[in-house]
């Protein structure tokens, strides 16, 4: 992209926003919502695992995996391994987060998969897993031919960014859905918790944008003016 902007600045912004998003979702679920638990008579504590694990997994670790090629100074093979590991950790976090949502619904007598958030979310984790498996067998082990890898790489990048944008979209739908439920149950629409959730959602949007820009912008900006120095004869 010949826009004269490097990816480096956006990678730093991504790290800061990722840390902010993690802190904010933890404050929400622990301070305002009472904490996290896999087993509890208060079923809301089981649900709280869902936003924490989904955001830290798909949004934060997934974003770090995407920008690892631009953010890390090591060899291509080392960065490829880190990229692969971060994505599989994100998948594990996502699986635990989805399990918590189903567990909460089942133990609370709530229907599963009735909302757009759940539909898009389930599709996203399936596509995420397909993307990871394709990357593993094509670029890591056992590895495809060099020609196939060269031809597949642009599609792998595009599809990966598409899945990440889907993850951001799913998160936004989730924040909206949960906050709507809470407000319909009596939560102050202009209270501190409502503002925290909305600001967390905004941080996630900006985080997603900075990750995508980090991925598509060049690591170095080349001089494309084509001018040469003019010297006196």
Image (tube, helix red, strand yellow):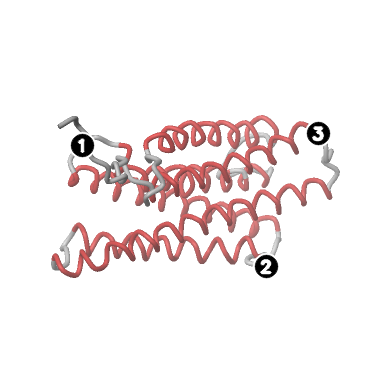
| Residue at 29 percent of width and 41 percent of height | 223
Say above or below: 196 vs 217.
above
Circle nearer the viewer, 2 or 3: 3
Q: Which residue was labeled with disc 2?
A: 114
Image quadrant assignment for residue 199: top right
First in sequence: mark 3 or mark 1? Answer: 1
Q: Position of residue 43 (x, y in %)?
A: 67, 47
Circle nearer the viewer, 3 or 1: 1
Image quadrant assignment for residue 21: top right
Circle nearer the viewer, 1 or 2: 1
Q: Which residue was labeled with disc 3?
A: 191
| Residue at 45 percent of width and 65 percent of height | 126
Q: Position of residue 89 (x, y in %)?
A: 37, 47
Say above or below: 175 vs 120.
above
Query: Mark 1 to mark 2: distance in Å?
Result: 45 Å
| Residue at 32 percent of width and 41 percent of height | 221
Q: Nearer the viewer, residue 10 or 98?
A: 10
Residue 74: give its label: 1
First in sequence: mark 2 or mark 3? Answer: 2
Q: Kindly check if marks 2 and 3 are in contact, taking CB atoms under 8 A apart as contact.
A: no
Say above or below: 19 vs 212.
above
Say above or below: 6 vs 231.
below
Query: Mark 3 to mark 1: distance in Å?
Result: 46 Å
Q: Secondary structure at mark 3?
A: loop
């Amino acid at each position: 992209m010949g826009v004269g902007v490097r990816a480096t600045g956006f990678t730093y912004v991504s790290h800061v926003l990722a840390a902010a998003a993690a802190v904010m979702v933890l404050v929400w679920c622990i301070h305002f919502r009472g904490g996290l638990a896999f087993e509890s008579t208060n079923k809301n504590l089981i649900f709280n695992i869902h936003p924490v694990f989904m955001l830290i997994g798909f949004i934060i670790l997934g974003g770090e995996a995407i920008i690892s090629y631009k953010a890390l100074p090591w060899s291509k093979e080392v960065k490829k391994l880190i990229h692969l590991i971060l994505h599989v950790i994100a998948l594990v976090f996502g699986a635990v987060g989805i399990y918590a949502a189903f567990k909460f619904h089942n133990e609370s007598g709530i229907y599963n998969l009735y909302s757009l958030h759940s539909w898009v979310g389930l599709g996203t984790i399936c596509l995420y897993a397909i993307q990871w498996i394709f990357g593993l067998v094509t670029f890591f082990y056992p590895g495809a031919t060099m020609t196939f890898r060269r031809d597949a790489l642009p599609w792998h990048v595009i599809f990966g960014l598409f899945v990440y944008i889907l993850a951001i979209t799913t998160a936004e739908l989730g924040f909206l859905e949960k906050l709507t439920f809470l407000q319909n149950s009596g939560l102050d629409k202009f209270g501190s918790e409502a503002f925290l959730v909305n600001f967390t959602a905004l941080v996630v949007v900006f985080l997603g944008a900075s990750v995508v820009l980090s991925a598509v912008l060049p690591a170095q900006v080349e001089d494309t003016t084509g001018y040469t120095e003019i010297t006196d004869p």
